[in-house]
Every structure is written in C-alpha cells, then in structure tokens.
Amino acid sequence: MERITFLPLIAHINEQSDYYNQLYRENELKYGTIDHSRISSWMINSIEPIIKKNHTSNPDQLPQLFKTFYIELLTILGNNLGIEHEDEYKQAWKLCTTNPALVSTSPAQFIKAIDSALESIRGFQPQNVFTWISRMECIIKDCDTVDEFLACGRIFAWLCGMAHLKPRAENEFIRLRSNLKQATINADSRLAFAFESSWPNLDKPSFVGETGGFVGFGGYFTAPPIVSQIGDRILVTDRKNSYLLFADSYGKVLLPNIPVSTDKIIQESSTVDLKSFISMYGKKIIPFDDVSSSVMQKSTLVLTRKSSHYLYVYGWSL
C-alpha cells in the first residue's frame, strides 16, 4: 500500500497523532465516518507534494501548513464535495505546488479561496470548472500576493460564465500590475477586448441563448417567469421566487434570494421594450406571438413567454 515517504512530514504526524485523531473524531461527529483509505490517498497525492514544495524554503511552516490542509480535507470529504467532485478538487489543489511562496503567506485563506471558487462556479457554470483551474494554472506563478491571485480568480470566473462578476472583474483587471495583466491576456486572449462590449462581434441583434427552465428539469422556475427592470437591474420572478439576471457573451446567471417582492416585479413588467426593439430592428428575429414581458438595456433584450419557463436573450454590439 502506498504511504507517505517525506520524513519531516512523517515525523510531524507521529508527534501530533493524538491531535490529528481528535480533529478527525470532531469532524466525524459533524459529518459521519470518512473512509480512511480515501484520506490516505489525498494525503499522499495532494497534501504531501504541497508540503514538500514548501519545505525547502520554509521548513518551519510544515506544522501550520499540514494542519490547514488536513482540516480542509476533512471538511470537503465530510460534506461529500471532495468525493463527488474529487477530480476538480485534486486538480485545483495542485495549484498550491506551483507557487509555494504565495501559498505560505496565508495557507488557510488560499485553500479556502480555491475551494470556494470551485463551489461557486460549479453552482452556476459547472461545465467550466476545469477551464477556470487551467486559467489559474497559467497565471499563479506571476502572482505576488493572495489578493492578486483572488483578483485573477474573479476575472477568469467571469470569463467562465459568472456574468454577475463583470463590473468587479473589470475593476480588478484595470488595477493589475502590467506584467500580471499581460499574463492574464496570454492565458485567455479574450481579455484583450472583453470589456468593450457585452456581445462582441455581433454587428446586429441576434438570439444568444436562453436561461432558466422548469425546476422539475433542473431549472429555476415553477411557472413561466416575468421579467422587469427596476433601477438598472433586470429582475425575474415565477411568482414564487425572485432573481437577478446577468447576461453577456460569456454566460448567464440568475442570482436567487433577492429582497424584492414578486408583486413589485410583476407590477413593473411590460412589453414596451419589445415594441421599442421592434421599431428599431424589426420583428424578424422575434418569432413569438405570446411574449409576456420584456426588458431592453443598452445591447441586451430579455423577454419571457406565456408558454415557456425560459428567459430568451438577444444581444448586439454597441
């Protein structure tokens, strides 16, 4: 059976075995029993390489580093995320071996930021989790601080479809050091023009996709939704729950738990924006005769239908 081989780590675990056993028992009370062979596999293949990379330049940090990663490991295995999405977490944790000096500045903040990012992206754009990891692999060596790493993480999360992050991503990108900014562009060439338009390369209004769907099929809505604009925000309701909609060429996101009443959204809804759109661009690309509400903002049109649980999104370049 494969075992840990790094002698300083073996010595530390042996010296603190009672403490780490206690941590396991506390985690077991909260989540239940964890397969010990799974813990062992993670420690050998994920944690030990991180410890070894860091040890050369910072041997005194071994106890803190191991404790941090062991506690996080128990958490993601206990809550089952590290089991259900094992490949994602293992690939993401490899980031910690690329820039050991960066990880050592704040190990707990660093690994929790990674795991939080995985969970967030998975919640909205699960197909893009590995894309985000690959982008972060390209730039982590150029990051001098955890804050820079977090900023790049938000920028690439936006490019992976987290549309609600665009304003913050743009601010983060502007403030990056010049060489780190270039590194992000090298990692994803879309950044060179990403902030110019929500829908680049669309010289005329075009259907750019749908979002939402019936909750029984993994969607959001229990009934055909209604959309309206309140302030500068696009809000959606199915008469039970309220959401904020964000959409651009990289993705569409519906944020739940919005403190706006469903009655207010319905009250503010109309099809006036659709009429304005048709007067400007014609009706050819809108093939529906049952539109129930619409919102048009700058270069985006969103409409709903009486016969559908989806939101229909159209975009064009300014």
Image (tube, rainbow, N blue to C red):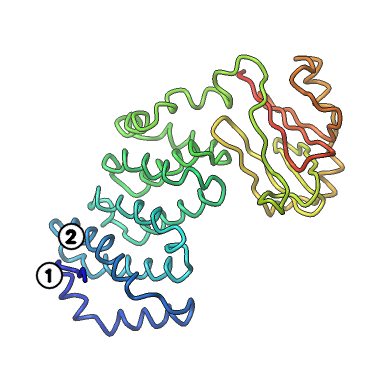
List x then y, in percent, for residue 215. Answer: 71, 52
Identity, as a three-letter code, of the amino acid under mark 1 = Leu
Give the Cα distance between marks 1 and 2: 10 Å
Q: Circle 1: is it few (<14), some (14-19), or many (20+) Cα within 10 Å?
A: few
Q: Is residue 47 above or below residue 169?
A: below
List x then y, in percent, for residue 256. Answer: 67, 51
**Quadrant of the rendering where the N terminus is positioned:** bottom left
Disc 1 and disc 2 in contact, CB within 8 angstroms: no
Label ID, residue 301: none
Mark 1 or mark 2: name the one nearer the start of the chain.
1
Question: Total of numbered circles in the picture?
Answer: 2
List x then y, in percent, for residue 175. Answer: 41, 34
Which of the two residues, 134 or 16, is positioned nearer the viewer here?
134
Identity, as a three-letter code, of the amino acid under mark 2 = Lys
Q: Which residue is mark 1?
A: 7
Tell me: 91 left or right of 243: left
Q: Circle 2: is it few (<14), some (14-19), or many (20+) Cα within 10 Å?
A: some
- Callout 2: SS: helix
At 37% from the left and 35% from the top, the residue drawn is 176
List x then y, in percent, for residue 213. Answer: 71, 45
Tell me: 63 left or right of 74: left
Q: Which residue is mark 2?
A: 52
Hey, which quadrant is residue 186 in on the image? top left
Hey, which quadrant is residue 40 in on the image? bottom left
**Quadrant of the rendering where the C terminus is positioned:** top right
Q: Is residue 306 above or below residue 16?
A: above
At 78% from the left and 15% from the top, the residue drawn is 282
- Callout 1: SS: helix
